[in-house]
Amino acid sequence: MADPVAAIELKGISKAFGPVQANKDISIRVMPGTIHGIIGENGAGKSTLMSILYGFYKADEGEIFINGKRTEIPDSQAAIGAGIGMVFQHFKLVENFTVLENIVLGAEDSAMLRPSLARARRELKALADEYELSVDPDAVIQEIGVGMQQRVEILKALYRGCDILILDEPTGVLTPAEADQLFRILNRLKDEGKTIILITHKLREIMDITERVSVMRRGEMVATVSTAETSPPELAELMVGRKVLLRVEKKPAKLGDKTLEVRGLRVVDDQGVERLRGIDFDIRAGEILGLAGVAGNGQSELLEVLGGYRIATGEVLLNGKPIDLTGSRSDGQSRRARGIAHVPEDRQAEGLIMDYTAWENTAFGYHHDHKYQANALFMKNAAIRADCEAKMKKFDVRPPDPMLLAKNFSGGNQQKIVVAREIERDPDLLLVGQPTRGVDIGAIEFIHQQIVALRDRGKAILLVSVELDEIMSLSDRIAVMFDGKIMGERKPGETDARELGLLMAGITDTTLPHSAAEVEAQLAERHGAAGKEV
Amino acid sequence: MDLLTLLQVLDATVRLATPLLLACLAGLFSERAGIFDIGLEGKMLGGAFLSAAIAAVTGSVWLGLGAGIVAALLLSAIHGLASITFRGNQLISGVAINFFAQGLTVVIAQSWFGQGGRTPQLGDGSRFAGLTLPGAEALRDVPILGPIYYELISGHTILVYIAFLIVPLTWWVLYRTRYGLRLRAVGENPAAVDTAGVSVRGLRYSAIVICGVLTGIAGAQLATAEPAAGFIKDMTAGRGYIALAALIFAKWRPWYALFACLLFGFLQALELRPDLIQAVIGLRVQGQLLSALPYIMTVVILAGFVGKAIPPRAGGEPYVKER
């Protein structure tokens, strides 16, 4: 059989940043008209490889072939010229421009704007008809939802005539319904003959949509297999290099008394927008309550209120005694003194001070403690360092060096430092926000085990995550937030991703079958309303 | 107050607003591209000095204008190198340029001309004279319109007319051309421009060049256009900062910039006519207070009393490629 020409072929690509070898002798062939997945842990080198393909970095070694022809890609202009389009994880859109202006930017026909805009408007309509990708060309980017913004990014690539579309972690910001819709669009593009590269760390997406999948680990391409001939456990093992438990093993919960009671909690932000609109829930000792929802529906505000750094109205009881929500006892330190520990959503901004050492970071929040404080003036630095070393050992932080700056650890190890600091206080209530965001699979497994162990010691845990899989596998009870309210509670065993997805989109009547179009209409309405509020 | 007096005040307003307007538009190009420019003051000063010096030496005001632009461009280039190529702090670079220009102009002027840090007096021919527009003399006696045309519109130097023409031109470039779209985009989200295959660095340097040319003209207007007759120490007197305040007041939009600069020009014009104030409000106002008015207004604007002004989102941040 003659070897068909690959749409993209990389041969022996290597790239180093200083002493770090981000890509090591990578070769890959992507066949035209297919969806090819690239999977790997954070820091495995996926994004670096794609950045080389899009002209952001120059490879130290190696060759790129596009449709069999050797191609140099020194900058993004060259990549676009070679027919490559890229949808980045963080969209590259000008927020206060219209959809049309964003699409035309950099691909104008002439020095005058009007003819370009007019042509783009016509082309956009043609593209919308061809790929079912309709958008309002005159909508301003900051007033449309993320799903729509992503659509604009895809249209941008298509407008530039791309044949090869690369998507970097495209579903991170989408609801399950929006993600399904994206996958329908991608399948459609494939049917029209486009080649698609999907970069993700979600095994399920790889299994659902790709034909072939390449696995990267520590800068190397460890395998390329046909998706039909592999399985999630096998892919996980390839990614991590050892066997991984994908499901969290946990015993049935032994529920105690109510640790946390939240009644009628309301938050109004600086712009006067109500972010929490009357929240009620309880968490019992020995229970994990998972809070699901698309980012930006009030989960962050709830964590901030309970963590003590946002003012709210309503009532919160911890072990039956009220917590000060507005007064002088409403701060992180008072909360910690009451036995509330907090693993914040954004570990780099709120959980750690990146320019401080690991040992200093292990004391933060508890630095007034007698364990760390010798007297009014001096800290017990040696004791803190020893304590840090012990925690690093127990939580398998790598490298186990207390003197290293926080920013020099990988995402997973940074998170382990935060989790170790908070869990080792043996709190009555643990608040955890996005515990595994940007954390590799091996570390995810470990962090999940630690959270479950804390629960088994009879503590209450509030878990906030946008990862539905994480919520479903860890929680004893699931509450879904939408637009500052709790839409409903479910038991993990008695619900599924579809039902939770509908709740996350604000649809409470989950008994009726909903068509994709109905969900889309509801989402459009929700984004429209959100746009007006801002 | 009769029509003629009013027209005289407005005439002074237009003249005094011109350097502000040029500097303000210069800042507009720079900041719309994401480069904050606190160094407008220094560039104007550099432009004022070199334009007057070359005009004095060669006797040609046009050569002077060219030299003024070159001086401002050189200072712009320093700002560009510091903030674009070397990704330095734009505020610090701007402040440095201001100090640099303030000191250097006086030092060079002193060693060159030996007149205590000023340039020689510019006579007619080596400075820009007022232009009498066609028909101004003939229409002078037509009631109302005649004096308006003769006193207010006619009689300014060419630089004044250029400055006012640059306002619609700026609007047109910004909103009707490919360059304008890219310029606005690079100040909002340089990553979007970069991934679209357009050079962020090229765009930002081009904005810096425009900024240099305009501040150079602004400096030349200060030092070589009637009734001024040469460079004196610190002659910009904070106009660069006032132009920045006007830019914020105008929310980085060209037509609003025109009105903001006219307002500041009017306040400066009032300073010249304390007698008028006394006649209108019946109170003698201290001259110092009048002189302080534009600066007080600047503080009020910068303190945010005029509503929320949202600067270009990527302003002040050097662009670093990232995934």
Image (cartoon, rainbow, N blue to C red):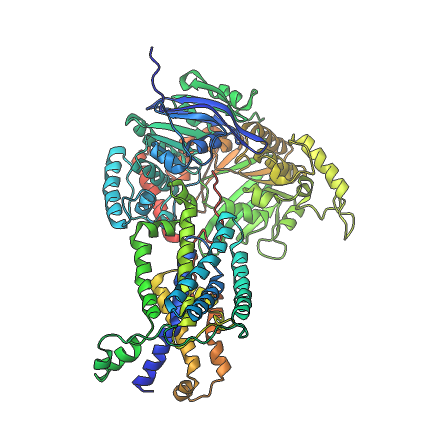
Where in the figure is residue B182, as x and y percent of width and height? 36, 49
Residue in the picture at 46% in, 50% down: A275
Does residue B210 show up? yes
The residue lying toward the viewer, choosing from A347 and A25, is A25
The residue lying toward the viewer, choosing from A398 and A58, is A58
Residue in the picture at 40% in, 52% down: B206
Does residue B250 show up? no
Where in the figure is residue A509, as x and y percent of width and height? 37, 38
Labels in figure, total: 0
Q: Is residue A130 above or below residue B68?
A: above
- Quadrant containing the N terminus of chain A in the rendered view: top left
Where in the figure is residue B21, as x and y percent of width and height? 38, 67
**Which image quarter: residue A293?**
top left
The residue lying toward the viewer, choosing from A352 and A354, is A354
Q: Residue furthest front?
A: B58
Where in the figure is residue A67, as x and y percent of width and height? 34, 24
Left or right: A379 in relation to A288: right
Left or right: A262 in relation to A148: right
Q: Residue furthest top?
A: A1
The residue lying toward the viewer, choosing from A396 and B138, is B138
